[in-house]
Image (tube, rainbow, N blue to C red):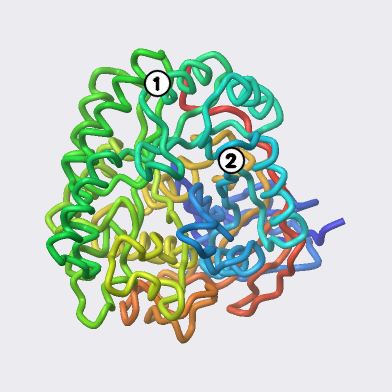
Amino acid sequence: MSTRTVIRGGLVVTASDEIHADVLIEDGRIAALAASGTAAAAAWTAERVIDATGKYVIPGGVDAHTHMELPFGGTFASDTFETGTRAAAWGGTTTIVDFAVQSVGHSLRDGLDAWHAKAEGNCAIDYGFHMIVSDVNQDTLKEMDLLVEEGVTSFKQFMAYPGVFYSDDGQILRAMQRSAENGGLIMMHAENGIAIDVLVEQALARGERDPRYHGEVRKALLEAEATHRAIKLAQVAGAPLYVVHVSAMEAVAELARARDEGLNVFGETCPQYLFLSTDNLAEPDFEGSKYVCSTPLRPKEHQAKLWQGLRTNDLQVVSTDHCPFCFVGQKELGRGDFSKIPNGLPGVENRMDLLHQAVVDGHISRRRWIEIACAAPARMFGMYPKKGTIAPGADADVVIYDPHAEQIISADTHHMNVDYSAYEGKRLTGRVETVLSRGELVITEREYTGHAGHGAYTPRSTCQYLN
């Protein structure tokens, strides 16, 4: 039995409301809200009282795109489920949805079982899984139906990485047709990988080997082309589509056009595309390798279109695509050949704070912050209102957030298991103070009080944005 808790005096911010209210937590769930100072709130008694005066009380973040322990390019993402979920909690995220991987020649079940084994008993916060589908065949398609029934309701495909995760248009169409029947959601890495491989080969032949060429060969037009093609295939299949890590303004335009036509097409972007650019990829002495991810960072002028897409709801979700590789010994695998740099950035700990900075800077409103970081990902992946809001009956995943605290992001102080920060030295206003996961304290006034194994596997229903 968890402790009965009252959070007093804070400004409760959800995607739809801002209200000065006290929050009562019982048995791991939100039991009630009452306006602060009223008789109803004053009558509550509890073993634990948290004073949130002058603070925000917000839902725990939902990061719907992480890659803990992902095998890639001959190495593994440096965060385990234990270190990665602990870092997520430090950053105010209380639920992740990670990607189980089907290897070519193996079943979806094999991949899912392997990821359950990695995560079980190791997570500080709750977690679910998407399924990467690398090998579409008749058996795979049948398995998709079974996975939807047991709460794995989203499937990622790749138009990039030929020879690794790549699916051709026929395989994509078959999977989309299946998801149209079983209620699953196809998540698409939309880049024309076949064309990109030609450009990589040509760049290396010209002696263009530095990290910045990673951004130059993975052209924005090839992201836009693949986004357009994915939308049309989904339209043919009568299936919904979720495009992951959108980085280019041309791809945003494709999503906006599809949504204007009334299609069930959704888009996600990530903090790295909102705050970083090709300037980082071009940093000297191989420092640019720290910023190699795919889709790649774009020139700064793309950022305004991404923020606009978040304001107009042409982009619905901000996830991290957290896939950390250490600079020493991992990123360095690509010295002299940018195509061998492991693709991925650390960020699971920074997302909520960076997006709060966007509120401070006037890019988005407070409620939109909670929408894109908590409520929308929970709805998109079938976890709302259990996750993503503060309301009676919801899981008591709650963050006490100090909107006035100042911090400087640094690898010296972060909790991710990686030897650099993509945002080193960036000054932010706002900081997580206390985090509860299902009513249990995971971060207590800037101290880690959680433990591996508290986090529970969370089966999901189908996308809640669909009719």
Task: Determine whether the residue tagged by mark 1 lies in a helix, strand or loop.
Answer: helix
Q: Which residue is mark 1?
A: 170
Query: Residue 428 or 317: which is nearer the viewer?
Result: 317
Which residue is pictured at 48% across the width and 48% down the height?
14
Task: Judge left or right: residue 265 versus residue 15.
Answer: left
Task: Give percent across and percent down for residue 266.
Answer: 36, 32
The quarter of the picture where the N terminus appears is bottom right
Q: Residues within 10 Å of mark 1 (few under 14, many from 20)?
A: few
The relative height of residue 284 versus residue 455 in the rendered view (above or below) is below
Task: Give percent across and percent down for residue 75.
Answer: 51, 65
- Residue type at mark 1 is Gly
In space, the residues marked 1 and 2 are separated at their CA atoms by 18 Å
Q: Which residue is mark 2?
A: 102
Which residue is pictured at 58% across the width and 47% down the height?
390
The mark total stands at 2
Q: Earlier in the sequence, mark 1 or mark 2?
A: 2
